[in-house]
Each structure stands twice: as structure tokens, then as C-alpha cells.
Amino acid sequence: MSKKALVVGGTGMLKDVVRWLVEQGYLVAVVGRNRERFERVLQGLSQPETVDYIQLDYHQTHELRAAMEALLLRNGPLDLVVSWIHLTAPEALTTIQMALSRQEQEWRLLQVCGSGAWKKPPQIVPTANCQYRRVILGFVLEGNSARWLSNQEIAQGVVNAIRNDQPLSIVGVVEPWEKRPAY
Ligand SMILES: NC(=O)c1ccc[n+]([C@@H]2O[C@H](COP(=O)([O-])OP(=O)(O)OC[C@H]3O[C@@H](n4cnc5c(N)ncnc54)[C@H](OP(=O)(O)O)[C@@H]3O)[C@@H](O)[C@H]2O)c1
């Protein structure tokens, strides 16, 4: 039976993570708002039918909860959730966790965080059967200057984090902190 994954924000910089999961044989559900962005994720995939689109705004907590419950009913328990959720939606991740806490099977949560999580780690509510992993997106030092990560570097770093399965993964570097690029 196929493993099942959910990628929240999987149509932007995590697009290649979704595509990698499909290649690994996962059934993948992707949360986003813009269907055209989702269609671009499917381009060139040999099995686009294994990717499910959950079109919603993750600020809408009731809608998000209902969508997670419907996903579990439709596909059964999930193995992996990769979450890239903006800080403007502080309830979204807990809503997903609470919905999935009803499943008996253990699942892995990879929370992808911006560099700020290095100095101010997000508060995570522990929930049943959830193995929590944090991925912090840092920056790249190039000689005396620094730049933010490219989408390709981010996606590859998240794939490595899924493979290596450590409690904390850092993509790029977070130190020396004072060298990080300006926003
Ligand atoms: N440390 C670093 O170097 C670093 C860290 C973070 C970001 N970045 C860069 O910054 C760029 C922009 O970041 P970004 O956050 O806009 O990333 P993004 O990954 O390009 O887009 C955000 C993703 O989340 C979805 N999304 C956003 N708001 C949503 C909502 N309210 N409800 C449901 N889904 C939602 C988007 O889909 P829809 O638009 O369809 O909703 C999309 O899939 C990235 O491309 C990356 O290169 C760099």
C-alpha cells in the first residue's frame, strides 16, 4: 500500500518536494489556494493522478479542520506532513495536528520554518502519535556577503531532512547570525 503525505504550501518553493514524494511512491495531498500554481506542480509527472489538491486558505480554521477530516476519511491515515505555513496563520498547524491525532498510526511532521526560528523557535503543541521534526531555512555565505536560499536549495534541503529524519535540520547556515542577508 502506498505511503501518504500532505504538503501544506506545496505549490511554491516546496514544489520539487511534492514531485520527489510522488517519485518515491507517495500519494500526496497538497494545500494551496491558487489552482494554476497547483497545475504547474503536476507538469511532467508520470502519475499526476496520485496528487490530490486541497484548495483552501489555511487562515480559515474551520475549513482547514474539515478538509483534514475529509482527507483522513478518503485516503486513510497519513505517514508524513510537510508544513510551510506563514506566521500570519498561527492556528493552522495545531489544527492539522489535532485532526491527525485521531489516527492511530504514527506520523511524522516536518515543520519548515524561516530563519527567525533559529532565534525564536515556534511553540509546538505535542499531539498523539506525532513525531515532530523542524527544518530551519537559513542562508548561504558567499565570501564576505550572504544571500537567501534558492527554491532549489530549499527543496533539496527539505528532501534531505525527510531522508535523514533528525529532530532539527538546517538548510544552509544560521551562524554567524549577524551575517544574514537583509530582507
Ligand atoms: N531562508 C530563506 O532563504 C527563505 C525562507 C523562506 C522563503 N524564502 C524565499 O521566499 C520566497 C517566497 O516565499 P513564500 O512563502 O511566498 O513561499 P512559496 O513557497 O513560494 O509560496 C507559499 C506556498 O504556500 C501556499 N500558501 C500561501 N499562503 C497560503 C494560504 N493562506 N493558504 C493556503 N496556502 C497558502 C502557496 O500557495 P497559493 O499561493 O496557491 O496559496 C504556496 O504553495 C520563496 O520562493 C523562497 O525562495 C527563502
Image: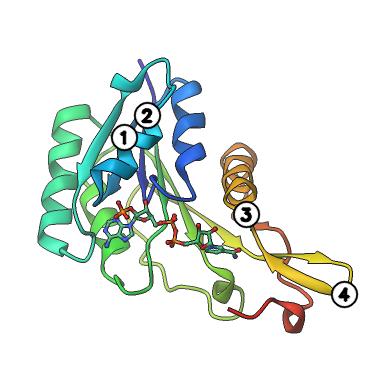
Residue 49: x percent and y percent? 29, 20
Q: Circles 3 and 2: CB distance less than 8 Å?
A: no
Residue type at mark 3: give it.
Ser
Q: Nearer the viewer, residue 61 or 37?
A: 37
State the residue in front, 98 or 32. Answer: 32
Per the image, label 3 sits on a secondary structure element best described as: loop
Residue type beneath disc 1: Glu
**Does the closest atom of ligand 1 sit within 8 Å of the Cβ of label 1?**
no
Q: Label 1 belongs to which residue?
A: 39
Quadrant hosting residue 143: bottom right
Measuring from the top left, give residue 13's x and y in whole percent: 49, 50
Disc 4 crowd, CA 10 A, few/some/many (<14, 14-19, 20+): few
Pointer 4: what residue?
Answer: 144
User: Within 8 Å: ligand 1 and the Cβ of disc 3?
Assistant: yes
Give the mark nearer the N terminus: 3 vs 4.
4
- The quarter of the displayed image where residue 142 is located: bottom right
Report the Cα–Cα distance between label 2 and label 4.
Answer: 39 Å
Could you tell which of marks 3 and 1 lies nearer the N-terminus? Answer: 1
Which three-letter amino acid code belongs to the residue tagged 4?
Answer: Asn
Q: Are marks 2 and 4 in contact (CB under 8 Å)?
A: no
Task: State the residue position of label 2.
Answer: 42
- Report if the CB atoms under discs 3 and 4 are less than 8 Å apart: no
The circle on residue 150 is 3
The residue that appears at 60% across and 80% down in the rendered structure is 119
Vertical placement of residue 33 versus 19, above or below: below
Question: Would residue 29 be seen by someone viewing this image from the given angle?
Answer: no
Estimate how packed mark 3 is, as few (under 14), some (14 to 19) or many (20 or more) residues with alpha carbons within 10 Å: few
Answer whether labels 2 and 1 touch (C-beta < 8 Å). yes
Q: Amino acid at mark 2?
A: Leu
